[in-house]
Image: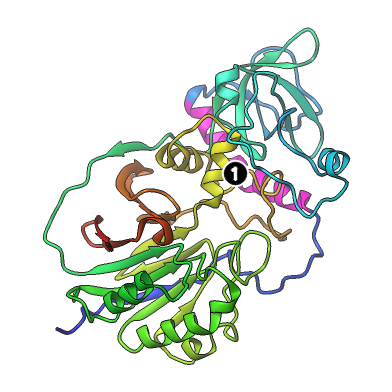
Amino acid sequence: MKRPEVDIVIEKTSFLMEKMEYTEQYGTIYFDRLKRLRPLLEISVKKVDSNICIVEKLSHIPQGRVALIGTLFKKSKKIPTLLNQYKSIKSVDSINFDEDSYVDDSDTCYLEDITSHVNLIIDKDQLAHIVSGTALAVIGELSNDSSFEIKSILYPYDKPKPTKLIEDETRCYIALVNDIQYSSEKKDLILHNILSNELPFPLIAHAILIGKHVSDPSFIPQYDWFLSSVCNNLNIVTIPSRDDPTNAVYPYQPIHPSIFAHASSKSTYHSTTNPSIISFNGVRTLILSGDVIQHYMKLTTFKTVNEVILQLFQCGHLCPCAPSTFPCFPASSDPFILEEPFPDVIVIGGFPEQCDSFDFMGKTITIVTVPSFAKQKTIILFDFENKLIKPIKID
């Protein structure tokens, strides 16, 4: 049976770095983030109180009830630093975030803009949902010790609302595979047969393969032939993770064509960034690996993917913890700000399969999570027209 035809467009986004030159300071990202999100935060404030004074500069905060806009930073004894880590082990390659949680009752925070900063008096439960680097607005007033006592917290966007999906007739699927860790085992052969249409899944139109791609670098040549063979019958997009041969900081750039030379020689093979945005028949799909979500959970009390995604969209940012606690490239402008047009679908690797949706800024957005293929031996067939999934378990 002939595969369904689907128009695929890999969008050129701010995630693709034209030049990887370290000429910018990391502070540039924070300044750009606040500059671009401030107009949205001002709108959020005026929705609550149209008459309130929005302070222009944190260096000049008047007495009385006012609104402040800035970037929140947390002070936490539990969050590791290079200096403290070096003191304990005398050698540092990277900062280790090995604990399950870095939230502590002793955490404090301050709000900062380009002119100054002010300490915040904030409810501990509210602070436990926020990470350093979040641009937000606060309404309150100065206390006797010149700290700012918060009465309410506002974000660039209204909080998304969960919705229900409606099932309809399936026309075709996108195969989503995460964490293949190719090692030339039986599971890899079965995956090859499924993607090559040698097993009865004729409705697969494209395949999105999210890293980690090989279990060991020695398997790269075999995985290249695996991809090349599948590309004879199917369009494939590979998306790197931090465990793949790409740059060491977010956003991860496309895997170089020389790594998978045979696959790269075919027009049906595509390599893109992580995160990336791919349109299937006009359905804009944001795809990312789960390491950012997992990191966010460690810095907050959120326990589910949905909780984190709803918070990120309300904050108008995909990775507010970068560069503070999540390494990223020092770009001249912040590549992670969420702006219109918003995606129709979000695909996240590294979590048990689920398919949910929420209403955000007048549109319904679907969340699809994809488990580790190496651990769960599961492929997700995603019906991008009806926004539903069909997990395929390999026994």
How dense is the environment of label 1, judged by Cα within 10 Å: few (below 14), some, or many (20 and up)?
A: many
26 over 53 or under it: above or below: below
310 over 266 or under it: above or below: above
Which residue, given by chain and number where applicable, does mark 1 sit on? 37
Residue at the spot 66% in from the left edge and 40% down from the top edge: 133
* In the image, farthest residue toward the top: 144
Would you say 204 lies left or right of 82 here?
left
Name the residue nearer the viewer: 132 or 65.
132
Q: Quadrant of residue 382?
A: bottom left
* Secondary structure that dominates the magenta span: helix
Residue at the spot 62% in from the left edge and 40% down from the top edge: 38
Q: Position of residue 345 (x, y in %)?
A: 36, 56
Determine if the magenta segment contains residue 244.
Answer: no
Quarter of the rendering occupied by the N terminus:
bottom left
Residue at the spot 35% in from the left edge and 72% down from the top edge: 186
Magenta highlight range: 26-47
Q: Position of residue 162 (x, y in %)?
A: 31, 37
What is the basis of the colouring in this image? rainbow
Helix, strand or loop at mark 1: helix
Q: Position of residue 18 (x, y in %)?
A: 66, 74
Quarter of the rendering occupied by the C terminus:
bottom left
* In the image, farthest residue toward the left: 169
Would you say 197 lies left or right of 99 here?
left
Q: Of the residues shown, which amino acid type is indicated by label 1?
A: Leu
Residue at the spot 58% in from the left edge and 64% down from the top edge: 15
204 over 371 or under it: above or below: below
Q: Quadrant of residue 175?
A: bottom left
* In the image, farthest residue toward the front: 186
Q: Position of residue 69 (x, y in %)?
A: 66, 32
Name the residue nearer the viewer: 180 or 233.
180
